Amino acid sequence: MINQLISSAENKIKLAENKNLLDVSAIRRHFLFPERGRIVTNNAASTQPPKELLNLYTDLSKDYENVHRGQSNASRYITNLFEESYNIITKFINAPDRRNIVITRNTTEAINTVMYSLLTQFRDGDNIVTTFMEHNSNYVPWYGLCKEILPKFGIKVECRLARFQPQTGELDLTHLKSLVDSRTKIICCIGASNFLGTKIHLHLVKEIADYSGYLQPNGECRSLLLVDGAQLIPGTFTDFHTLNVDYLCFSFHKMLAPFGIGVLCAKQHLLETSLPFLYGGDMIAEGDVSPDYVGYNSLPWKYAAGTPNILGTIISAQALRLLLDLALNPDEQKYFLTTNEFNIQTVEGAMNRISSHIKMLTEKAMYILSRIKGITIYGPKNVNRRTGLISFNVAGCNPFEIAEELNKAGVESRAGCHCATLAHKYLKLDPPASCRLSFYFYNTIDEAEFAAETVNKIVNSKNRIDISLNTNENTLNNGLTK
Ligand code: PMP
């Protein structure tokens, strides 16, 4: 009897837990890659697009027209969808208003937008603080500004790099703090590392920025904070309002949408007072161009010069609606292509389910990988501190060869420095490379297991070959010396 009670209580707990589990088989029916038998575990580079988003290109093409540039029904229809996309993105990341949103090509362009819009604000003797954990997209623009652009105008600005703990993959906040002073105009920091997987304690970085004492042009006394959210936002609930950062950048091709659209979400007063990044059509106030004066359009259009990637923007915003459906109920289209409202709690619920699933996959793969002799897994040991990627090296194995062998077994991975060149060099990796598996919420636990087990097999068979080669060499040598 007691046993029966226990088991029924256990079942109840299991059922309750199951409610929070993603329906991965149903989710996978929305994608083409399973039909190919692909094991897609290179999601930190780009995720796969659901069929609905690809079909949307064709559907939208029936009313194919430019935006803000015509009086036809088609132009009005597409303009409405395009403008509504800004609202969807705004809601998804809990920004105050669509005036906070700048649509770019990708994260890289979003960061460059910040760099160029602030270009003329830097004063001689200022500094920029970033970290050794950055993707090149959040280091090279600041390097270029400090080493190439500003010196041409006689302005010296230093670019400082905060260290991370090689063992734990955690950002060294004490070191970061020591680099920040009253001349730090901006701190540029990754949200989550695309190599170590570490999620940064952004509220602590924000605190450091807030107490720097830098005098900004509007009288505020603090450093600005830019967060590169490319690896954070696709799998972790991210709320712009609560984070309270100045700039948040990300790319849609890492969260279901096809390639081509990124976002800069910025505080409105910064976009209002900064210079535009690109100059040209549509970013000017209607009729306000004369030989001596150009008036800019209101936000968000001040940062939308030229014909934008219209279909890409609409489809990317719909990707967010579809992501909610897939996470909450993949058999129902409650949000995709509807006007149904969603609030930040809906997004939080969906993203938390996605995070839990990714965590489970990462934990499983890390467990198997960690038993491989000679392996180094980079970044935090605790999956709660990580995103869904695992970078590793195995002593005596070339990471590129592992990736090639994985590919032969049908497992897609990435070897290289993943554009985290500074971090690979900081760890003195030679070559500056690692092999990386990265999961998304359409991956199954079997796939995570298979990918990690395949690494195990590759390493074991390489070790066997090495041993037999050594044995043969010894036999040969012995033969020769005799
Ligand atoms: N930052 C991070 C952390 C990334 O992982 C990436 C993409 N690998 C980028 C920036 C650059 O993104 P994109 O190529 O979309 O500009």
Image (spheres, helix red, strand yellow):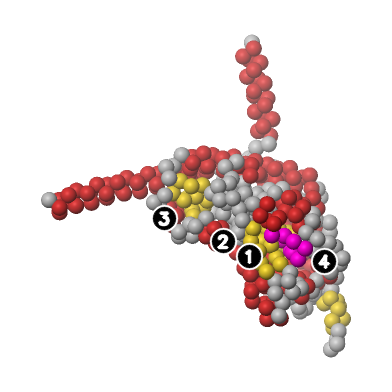
Q: Tag 4: Cα neighbours inside 10 Å, few (<14), some, or many (≥20)?
A: some
Residue identifier under label 2? 422
Marks 4 and 2 sit apart, C-alpha to C-alpha, by 29 Å
Figure quadrant of the N terminus: top right
Q: Position of residue 199 (x, y in %)?
A: 65, 49
Residue identifier under label 4? 216
Marks 1 and 4 sit apart, C-alpha to C-alpha, by 22 Å
Q: Tag 1: Cα neighbours inside 10 Å, few (<14), some, or many (≥20)?
A: many
Marks 4 and 3 sit apart, C-alpha to C-alpha, by 48 Å
Q: Are marks 1 and 2 in contact (CB under 8 Å)?
A: yes
Give, as a three-letter code, the residue at label 1: Tyr
Q: Are marks 4 and 2 in contact (CB under 8 Å)?
A: no
* Residues in magenta, as a range: 179-187
Marks 1 and 2 sit apart, C-alpha to C-alpha, by 9 Å
Give, as a three-letter code, the residue at label 4: Gln
Give, as a three-letter code, the residue at label 2: Leu
Seen from the viewer's position, the closer of residues 160 and 456 is: 160
Give, as a three-letter code, the residue at label 3: Asn
Q: Earlier in the sequence, mark 1 or mark 3?
A: 1
Marks 2 and 3 sit apart, C-alpha to C-alpha, by 20 Å
Element type where label 1 sits in the image: loop
Q: Earlier in the sequence, mark 4 or mark 3?
A: 4
User: Is residue 292 shown left or right of residue 29?
Assistant: right
**Relative vertical location of residue 110 with respect to residue 281 in this rendering, above or below:** above
Kindly report which numbered mark, 1 or 3, lies closer to the viewer in this rendering.
Answer: 1
Residue at image location 62% in from the left, 14% down from the top: 3
Residue identifier under label 3? 398
Element type where label 4 sits in the image: loop
Element type where label 3 sits in the image: loop
